[in-house]
Image: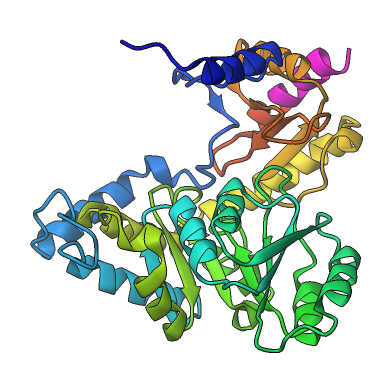
Amino acid sequence: MKKLPSKLQSKLALRQQANSLRTLPINKTLVDFSSNDYLGFAQSKEIFDRTHTFLQENEMNQNGATGSRLLSGNHKVYSQTEAMLATFHNAEAALIFNSGYDANVGFFSSVPQRGDLIFYDELIHASIRDGLTMSTAKSYKFDHNNLEDLEKKLTLLLSGLDTHKEVYVVTESIFSMDGDSPNLQGLVALCKAYNCHIVVDEAHAIGVFGQYGAGLLQELELEHEIFARIVTFGKALGCHGAAILGSEELKSYLVNFARSFIYTTGLSPHAVATIQSAYYELQVTENIGRLKCTIDYFKQQLETEGLESIFVQSNSAIQCCLISGNENIKRIANTIQNKGIDVKAILSPTVPEGKERLRFCLHSFNTKKEINAVLNYLTTFALV
């Protein structure tokens, strides 16, 4: 086997020296404070059985999609599921992608055109950033959740702008590494004033906020003000894939120009049917209410234990404790994991240097006893 080129070896060595080298973890049976399975749907026998029954009743006895959706892979479950998603999310249309990554890369690499401007929150997900690097439009970041900074940049850069050029503003309803939210009502008002298209990634809001877990935008009744919403199914829905919600025209455009949609094999009938089953479960489950109680209890305990000052303010299922230094945060995470609780260290460069953190993902199935235990370990091992 040929050796890795020296330039690549050097990059790996630098990661090793910074104590930030990533490796694939071995799954252990630990108390889960790390996964995105907020509602426990990834483990749901009801969803599994409902999907199997649906496929049998619809005589969908095939394992794969057989090709891209534009060739042979557009099986009938796709149209049924996209119609369901559009209705559930109060959208004109929905287009399913293989993952949230594919959806974001496909949208941002194809929709904004040369000469257009994109303004994005500095903490947006890596998949959006990758899409922006593939775009021919110019992009500018604004300070995290800071509408004053966004307006300052809009005023400066849109002065005398050709009216034929479009402006996009990009954010997340729940940020994956902080668990916080922007002022979405204020963002909508600002973008109306400047005639901007708003794009919002709702990956970590689906299943957590809104009636039946429809998302934070629908909870705030803002969905009709948004140009495009990205919803993903690999978090609270416990399955796989993503969809872009918007107008019928936007859907048609993406089918024709989003390369991550066009040039890939589609999801299998089983994967798409599982999305349908998970959305059905959203409308009957008690787990959304249980999750809200878990979040409330966790935050109450932070206050009781005097830990609020080291946590990022968040009302979501993502709660982050800031402890700087890759070596330090890895040591604390490993110590807690050795006590049987899975909480993950988030290292730089995933987050900015000095903003390393323990990321607690809360679930409907986490107990008060488990929360008390993990916070006790945090106090014991981190605040010494």
Q: Is residue 383 magenta?
A: yes
Q: Quadrant of residue 85?
A: bottom left
From the viewer's perspective, tell me whether residue 94 is left or right of residue 155.
left
Q: Farthest residue toward the front?
A: 6
Of the pair 287 and 215, the residue shown nearer to us: 215
Give the colour scheme of this rendering.
Answer: rainbow
| Residue located 62% across and 52% down the image | 129
Q: Main secondary structure of the magenta part?
A: helix
Q: What percent of the width, then of the height, locates residue 305?
A: 87, 30
Q: What percent of the width, then of the height, locates residue 84?
A: 36, 74
Q: Is residue 300 magenta?
A: no
Residue range highlighted in magenta: 373-384
Q: What percent of the width, then of the height, locates residue 109?
A: 51, 62
Q: Quadrant of residue 83?
A: bottom left
Q: Is residue 353 above or below residue 162?
A: above
The N terminus lies in quadrant:
top left
Q: Farthest residue toward the bottom?
A: 163
- State whether residue 71 appears in this view: yes
From the viewer's perspective, tell me whether residue 326 is left or right of residue 73.
right
